[in-house]
Amino acid sequence: MKATLITSFKDITPEGGILELVVWHLPAAVPPCMHRYKYRAVFVVNGERVIGFDNERGKGDHCHRQGQEQPYQFTGVDQLIEDLMTEVERWRSEH
């Protein structure tokens, strides 16, 4: 079984930022994650990643917020989208 693309989305926001989301369903989990999704969700402004969620081999699920990396509890694709948009709105309200 091969990886299956679940969604891929890229848009330019009103402030000129880039909002991108890509999610794959995998045949097996990528350690140390226990789920079978590979994802990246990012908001880039002026060429700088200000918000990002991703998982990678060895690191697992984590998020990036203005240069800080923190663990992230991935519970599903819908929640990932909601968390990304919440963080984008938070950033917008602060800038």
Image (tube, helix red, strand yellow):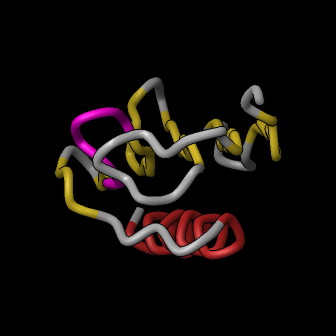
Quadrant of the snapshot with the C terminus? bottom left
| Viewer-closest of 75 and 29 | 29
In the rendered structure, the answer to whether residue 69 lies left or right of residue 64 reads left
How far across and how far down the image is residue 87, in percent?
Answer: 47, 68
Q: Which residue: 75% across, 26% down?
A: 2
Q: Which residue: 64% across, 36% down?
A: 18
**Number of marks in the image?**
0
Which stretch did the figure color magenta?
56-62
- The image quadrant of residue 12 is top right
In the rendered structure, the answer to whether residue 19 lies left or right of residue 12 reads left
Q: Which residue: 20% across, 51% down?
A: 69
In the picture shown, does residue 1 fall above or below 15?
above
Q: Which residue: 38% across, 46% down?
A: 50
Q: Is residue 80 magenta?
A: no
In the rendered structure, the answer to whether residue 40 lies left or right of residue 57 reads right
How far across and how far down the image is residue 4, in percent?
Answer: 80, 35
Q: Looking at this rendering, what residue extends furthest in the front direction?
A: 1
Quadrant of the snapshot with the N terminus? top right
- The image quadrant of residue 19 is top right
In the picture shown, does residue 26 fall above or below 92?
above
In the rendered structure, the answer to whether residue 10 lies left or right of residue 88 reads right
How far across and how far down the image is residue 14, in percent?
Answer: 74, 49
| Viewer-closest of 77 and 15 | 77
